[in-house]
Amino acid sequence: MLRTEPLQDGSRGNIAQIPESPPTMILPRFGIVAAALFSIILFVAAAWLTTGLCIAIWLHSGRLARLDPGTAGAGIAFRILVTPGIMALWPLLLRNWRRHRRGMVAAPDAEDWLPAARLRARHGLIVRSVAVAVPVLCAAAIIARPAPIANGSPIPDALRTPPLAAVAEDRAPFLLAQGVAALIRTDERRSAWQLELAVTERPGIRGPMLYWFPPAGAGAASEYLGPVSAAGVHRFAISETMVREGSFAILSFRDATALGPARRGGG
Amino acid sequence: MSASYRAIAWNRHKRLCDIALAGILVAAIGAFAGTAAATRPGMTAETLVIRSTAIAALALLHVILCIGPLCRLNSLFLPLHYNRRHLGVTMFFLALVHSAFAIIQFQGFGDANPIVGALTAYARDYAPGVGIANFPFEIFGAAALAILFVMAATSHDFWLKNLGASFWKAMHQLVHVAYGCLLVHVFFGALQSERSVAYPLVLGAGFAAVAVLHVAAWRKEKLADDRMAPAPDGGFVDACAAADLRESCGKSVWIGGERVALFRKGDRVFALSNVCRHQGGPLGEGRIVDGCATCPWHGWNYKVEDGCSPPPFKETLPTYNVRVRDGRVLVHPAPNPPGTTCAGASCKEGAP
């Protein structure tokens, strides 16, 4: 049975027991660094594109036609079409503009013709590199992928999984954490089990995930059941073993913490 | 070219191709949705969108990558090449929808930036220990999307002109890098949980098709170049027999390490660079139309006498000095500066 105890205030419900010390996990220090790095990259990319948008507006105000006479008289659809490219490659257009202002007639036609041999050599290098690297990596992905969780149930799409059709036993709901009420369902034959979480408050930790932990000393591994990142009802397929023994907990590896101890509450 | 640009240069042929493309995509996504609804009723609409757009984009990318070598092998595929740009932009938009839904589905509604969350999801220990399950496959997807965005954003003749053909072509050859990133993204992502052998087999077959076609096209071109290895004669290189040149038809020859396009106009022979200024098409496989050598890929024109595009267009190609001796066409390997007028050579014996 789930390790629970009746609420002492007489109301319906049980308290779920969260283990005193969650299993050892790899603290994602590199994850913290990676998050910081990608945040910076994202900021730089946003600044780049914003600058590009300003330059695009500036160019579209008559200067583009001086840079490229072919744009004179071009319609709004053309201007909208080339704007994303200007946002991405604005330094090159600014270079062209600077050359134009200095009176340097851009002579791409004269200087920038395409020797076929150079084109094909470059094309061949790229194709050969991809042709060698990709099969090696993809084969490694298939060979080294982990085995499916033994006796595990596939994790359903948590937000829309319907409840079991016939609920024969509806355990009294219990509070897993503040704002997270849990309910265990099964069907008439007790062949399928489902844990239903009603999340009424937005979790206060990053990347909250639901785990099941075996009893201490049982020797079995903990099992990841699914994310609990949004308010609403989440349903997870569980096994009868999880119902009979062990406990559930909501953990965040980003914050290296659990979602606080279970609290008493009404069902 | 240098006339006033239009957003999309639609013509009847392109409209028909775009309508056919839209129809095929709608039918394919509809078929996927129907199959998924029947076999996996628990699949949500968001998951359906994520998977259907991913499959459609990846399938389209395989088609796009095959078009180039197919055209080298058989000119019947040229109409596909003519519309390859539209296929590429469509593929990018499918990939964009896939990315947006995936980020919202798996990273949204939290208190972290969803894009940063997607790129650092690998750092989350969702499998015991550090292993293949923690491979940053999302980053490869993001890299591919960035490449495809730049390619889609510069898929217009405006960019060809203002970036220069060489840089533009180099940038668009990154499609192969994007393809590799996408395969890694799929194999280290979705295929870690999808255990059916069908997925890696189908993807492997697609990769093999792209690779085999590329090798076949390369081999065909190399054999043709090896056959054309001529002996130098006073600086001029023997290219071919004058009788091999048909009226108003082009012919590609290998001279001094480069492809040269020969054209016969009337009884005179002219030589231009084989590489079209537009997207590097094989000019020598085109014909003379209205007095101009016409590229078979997108119809760009160049006067055979000087390699210049007819007004108001301003593109130019290098020309080559050419002679005819004893029924043989000789070409000097050093190209003239683009736009240089070259008188050509008469195919009649004794004529200048």
Image (cartoon, helix red, strand yellow):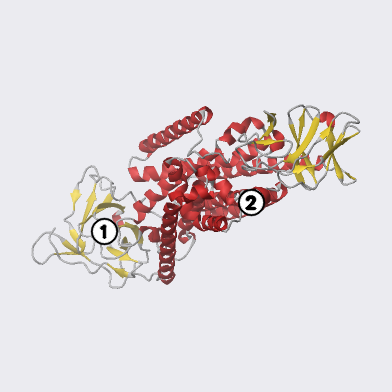
Given residues A139 and A213, the one toward you in this image is A139
Chain of the residue under the numbered disc 1 shown in the image: A
Residue at 14 percent across and 60 percent down: it is: A13
The label on residue A244 is 1
Residue located 53% across and 28% down the image: B13
The percent position of residue B158, horizontal first and vertical second, equals 54, 45
Badge 1 marks a residue whose secondary structure is helix
Q: Are marks 1 and 2 on the same chain?
A: yes
Determine the chain carrying the residue at label 2. Answer: A
Q: Quadrant of the C terminus of chain B?
A: top right
Instruction: Check disc 2 and give the amino acid type.
Output: Ala
* Near-viewer residue (B154 or B73): B154
Residue at horizontal 22 percent and vertical 43 percent from the top: A166
Query: Is B43 or B319 nearer to us in this picture?
Result: B319
State the residue position of label 2: A107
Q: Residues within 10 Å of mark 2 (few under 14, many from 20)?
A: few
Image x and y of residue B133, in percent: 46, 59
Q: Split into 4 quadrants, where in the image is the N terminus of chain B?
A: top right
**Res A136 quadrant in image:** bottom right
Kind of residue indicated by mark 1:
Arg
> Residue at horizontal 72%, vertical 48%?
A117
Q: Nearer the viewer, residue A91 or B181?
A: A91
Percent coordinates x, y for residue B182 in the rendering: 51, 50
Residue A209's x, y, as percent? 32, 61
